Amino acid sequence: MREDLLYFIWKHNKLPTNQLYTGNNELVRIKSIGFQNKLAGPDFFNAQVEIDGQLWAGNVEMHLKSSDWYVHHHETDENYNNVILHVVWEDDIVVFRKDGSQIPTLEVKQYVPGELLDRYRALMENSRTSFINCEKDYKEIDAFIMENWMHRLFIERLEHKSKLILDLLDASKNNWEAVLFIVLAKNFGSTVNGTYFLERAKQLDFSIIRKTTNEPSQLEALLFGHFGLLHAEDCTDAYYLQLQKEYIYLKQKFDLLEPLSKPGYFGLRPLNFPTVRISQLISLYSKNHNLFSKLMELDKLEAIYQTLEVCASPYWEEHYTFGKVSKKQVKKLSRNFIDLVIINTLVPLKFCYSKYIGSQWNEELISLVSQVTKEKNSIIQNFGKIGSKAKNALESQAQLELYNNYCAKNKCMQCVVGTQLLNRNI
């Protein structure tokens, strides 16, 4: 039993309307459930409940046991002074407000339909043996309802991704170009080096990048050095030694922080090596001096591809690491990689920037992300196996949000799918 089932029962009017009684045998009639509060304070605000013939307006608090009132120290919290009804699964103790007045308590376990409880138990029991609790019934949800839920989940995922961007904006005093560079660096680091690239990018003043973009050799030395890629002790490669010499000069000139560690290579395919990715990032900034402004203006997917389809420098056509020659290959950003940049960097930035300047964002972003190919990972594949194949990046992003923040946390009663399944014919 979880409190979210109590919220579901209350929100969806699963209690009989004319035969509810408090622990003191007072007749309860629910006139309005109020609205759910997902922040600190009582669970439902502005409810209206008639108790023993008297109409009360105020807040409703819910617990598995009435004694949880004291476990959570609500008796000393003024935010709970206006609680008019305490809804619990089990009434095990009389509860009082801070002023000493008793709070009417409604024990609901005797009123909840057995069929609903059976469905809830079946749903929760699947969490140990299945991909998601509702996987056997997932396909039964109405397509229109699912489409709206997917759109809501996509927006939730954008909101979660916005937190990093907003924090970076605050730290950089709203320097959008600097924020783009930091988030791009994180994306170019991928799973293995993303966090490392993010932290190193945050430590580099973007004004230094601006000062070096007109000198390709300086920009290369700056970024290879700053991201910890010029620390080989036995490399005699002329290109490497020139970069190292240039970086020592730049480090002194701009008082740069020395990297305390190096990026990783373990588990990476050669095309994902940090050397290759940094070179591609350098090419992107060498060709686009006002990259943020340009990307914000682009709304056609093909134009975005053309801007982001850059190659590592010619040296890397025959190298994956400094000083070691390999079979010649042009190392161009793939469409799949650019799709990930669009999903994880461009779309969240467009979302935040549109809100910042007060423009409409929804139609353009929905259209853009709906044209991008879905991601490929085990979560998306498992949704496909239960009959929910994502058609594009919007749906795959929604599925990731659904799984990570609902399914994996057993928040079935906060999910449209779970509530629909429990609501059927009850």
Image: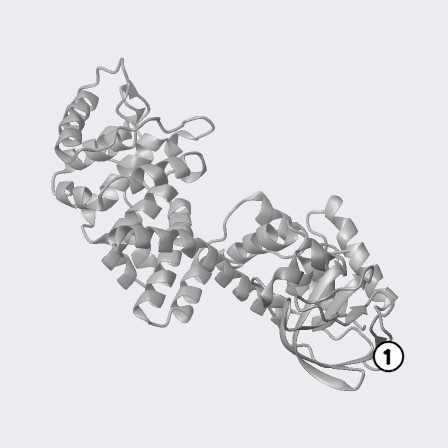
- How many marks do you count on the picture? 1
Point out residue 407 in the picture as x, y percentages from the top left corner: 65, 53
Q: Residues within 10 Å of mark 1 (few under 14, many from 20)?
A: few
Q: Determine the residue positioned at 60% across, 52% down.
A: 403
286 sits left or right of 44 in the view: left
Percent coordinates x, y for residue 301 in the rendering:
35, 59
User: What residue appears at the point 22 percent right and 45 percent down from the top-left corner?
Assistant: 206
| Image x and y of residue 308, in percent | 30, 49
Image quadrant occupied by the N terminus? bottom right
Residue found at the very far front of the displayed protein: 100
Residue corresponding to mark 1:
19
Q: Position of residue 53 (x, y in %)?
A: 79, 86
From what the image shows, is residue 106 above or below residue 243? below
Q: Nearer the viewer, residue 390 or 38?
A: 38
Kind of residue at badge 1: Gln
Q: Quadrant of the C terminus?
A: bottom right
**SS at mark 1 in the image:** loop
Q: Is residue 178 left or right of residue 373?
A: left
In the rendered image, the vertical position of residue 300 relative to residue 219, given as above or below: below
